[in-house]
Image: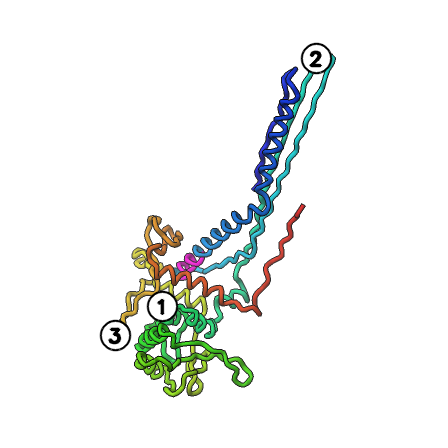
Amino acid sequence: MTMKNHISTATAEPGKPLSQLVFMLVGIVVLLASGCASIGADTMVRDRFDYNSAIAESWKKQMLLNMVKIRYGDVPIFLDVASVINQYALEGTVNLGASWLTDPSSTSQNIGAQGKYTDRPTITYNPLTGKKFARSLMRPIPPLVILSMIQAGYPADQVMRVGVQSINGIQNRFGGAARAQLGDPEFYPLLQAMREIQKSGLIGLRLKKIDKYETTMMVLRSKGAEKLEKELAMVRRILGLKAQENEYRVVYGTVAAQEGEIAMQTRSMLEIITDLSSFIDVPQVHVDENRVNPTLQTDNIGGVTVEPLMHIHSAVKRPDDAFVAMSYRDTWFWIDDRDLESKRLFSYLMFLFTLTETEEGREGAPIVTIPTG
């Protein structure tokens, strides 16, 4: 974007004092100087937070749109904002001239100024394709990340419902059309018990070296656990763990290979998004026309009511109070700004997305060269 400001040349009437023109010149110089004050450090606050808000909002809309596209069997496309570079330039010229002729009445003076302001943002986008797509969306989330989120205070039941497909063979629900399934009856009581244990601070994470390899250990503390003996006993019974032990090795897998081990089959980001997209409320006319599968209703598994993790609404009219909203197939899809649980889970999903890349596999941002003079 280029903006130009011009101050046109002024010519004095014959016989007009030169001092007035000098005052005009001083005013123009002050004007240009005041413009220069906004270039440089003062633009940092404005640019940093404006671009921060714009990137965050576009990121939310991109995630919601891809969830809806997956729900409709469409192709998800993710674009990363690799870099944002802004270049400013301010140029100004001032000229002053006077001429005297033999005839005093023909004497004239002129003064003029011209200014040019340039703002050139350079934004670089990187599509997720190939290895980067496989690494970010197709690779299962490491069990260490799941336990770290629980350690950080995220609700254990929510974290495991979102990111874990099975634990020691106990299956979670999955809403993807290709392999939709209800969860095992023991899965949800297990999550409830782990949530109660977490509230009391009796569940923890520890990294331990076993055979020269760093191993993830889940710790169930026994000190101060008198009020939660029932919950602790339930967790150990369902997972087949010894009651006299407090530390259990956590590995990726479907079934524990040895006694005292917790095999956690985690989901990939694509599986997580596919499962959460099954909760999207779609128009009935789209279901009737076989454009999309019906929305799964509330499950009752083993006497436990399993509520939807997230509520995403749809309507023809654009919503008035939305946390995030996107239009797709002439229909608006959105999360209500007053639905705190859905907002939190959506934000958690985006945060989890940033944890899927490792330092070893992260690609460097593209190098962009811009002139400085």
Q: Quadrant of the C terminus?
A: top right
- Kindly check if marks 1 and 2 are in contact, taking CB atoms under 8 A apart as contact: no
Relative image position of residue 277 (x, y in whole percent)? 38, 63
Percent x, y for residue 183?
A: 33, 74
Above or below, 67 against 198 in this view is above
Q: Which residue is mark 2?
A: 104
Disc 2 marks a residue whose amino acid type is Pro
Q: Which residue is mark 1?
A: 175
Q: Residue at x 52, y 58 (%)?
A: 80
Residue 73 visible in the shown view: no
Magenta region: which residues? Answer: 62-70
Q: Is residue 55 above or below residue 98?
A: below
Amino acid type at mark 3: Gly
Q: Residue at x 64, y 24 (%)?
A: 21
Q: Nearer the viewer, residue 20 or 49?
A: 20
The kind of residue on which mark 1 rests is Gly
Comparing labels 2 and 3, the label whose residue is closer to the camera: 2
Instruction: Say which of 126 and 55 sits in front.
Output: 55
> Of label 2 and label 3, which has the lower sequence position?
2
Q: Earlier in the sequence, mark 1 or mark 3?
A: 1
Write down the residue under mark 3.
Answer: 303
Tag 3's secondary structure?
A: loop
Which residue is most to the left?
303
Q: Is residue 189 left or right of residue 14?
A: left
